[in-house]
Image (spheres, grey):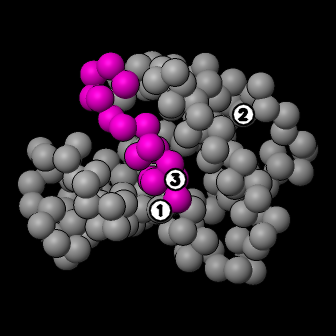
């Protein structure tokens, strides 16, 4: 179990209040699919993913990105039981979808870059980044749990 300080809990809550899942999720997932094109294999039902413009303009990419980022709210609200709340999602990705768990890390990196760019260095400074990284690593670990 991860120990969260009061300051970390406050930072995570403050960041979450600034996040618009529809916007951030669409941008982060598009970045993942553009920068790491092999991840597109999991999204074959999304239609045209042939180039950056097609990916950025794809409504299914935007919708799924929103769902993924929106799902982080469960972790924000349950910091002391992140692994528990993502058990079924981990099982789904492992046993049904067969997603390579390294993709969780790739997406979290894209999400972090997108968030940092959106908030800028005055908000997303090194201390905030440290707390965000701890948080997102706990989420990635929870989603990867079923793979172990």
Q: Residue at x 26, y 61 (%)?
A: 37
Name the residue that disc number 2 marks: 79
Residue at the outermost front position: 148
**Residue 58 coordinates in the image, percent (x, y):** 19, 62
Q: Which corner quadrant holds the N terminus? A: top right
Whether the residues at callouts 1 and 2 have beta carbons within 8 Å, the answer is no
**Residue 72 coordinates in the image, percent (x, y):** 55, 42
Q: Is residue 95 magenta?
A: yes
* Magenta-drawn segment: 94-109
* Alpha carbon separation for disc pair 2 and 3: 17 Å
Mark 2 or mark 3: name the one nearer the start of the chain: 2
Mark 1 or mark 2: name the one nearer the start of the chain: 2
Q: Looking at the image, which is closer to me, 78 or 40?
A: 40
Q: Residue at x 50, y 48 (%)?
A: 105
Q: Is residue 96 left or right of residue 146?
A: left
**Residue 109 coordinates in the image, percent (x, y):** 52, 59
Name the residue that disc number 3 marks: 108
Quarter of the image where one finds residue 55:
bottom left
Identify the mark at residue 110; answer none if there is no mark: 1
Whether the residues at callouts 1 and 3 have beta carbons within 8 Å, the answer is yes
């Amino acid at each position: 179990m991860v120990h969260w300080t009061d300051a970390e809990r406050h930072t995570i809550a403050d960041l979450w209040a600034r996040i618009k899942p529809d916007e951030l999720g669409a941008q982060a997932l598009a970045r993942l699919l553009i920068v790491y094109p092999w991840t597109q294999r999991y999204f074959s039902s999304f239609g045209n993913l042939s180039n950056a413009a097609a990916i950025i303009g794809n409504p299914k990419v935007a919708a799924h990105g929103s769902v993924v980022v929106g799902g982080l709210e469960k972790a924000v609200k349950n910091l002391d039981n992140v692994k528990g709340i993502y058990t079924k999602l981990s099982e789904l990705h492992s046993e049904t979808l067969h997603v390579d768990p390294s993709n969780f890390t790739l997406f979290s990196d894209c999400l972090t870059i997108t968030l940092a760019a959106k908030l800028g260095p005055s908000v997303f400074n090194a201390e905030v980044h440290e707390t965000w990284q701890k948080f997102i690593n706990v989420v990635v670990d929870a989603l990867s749990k079923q793979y172990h």
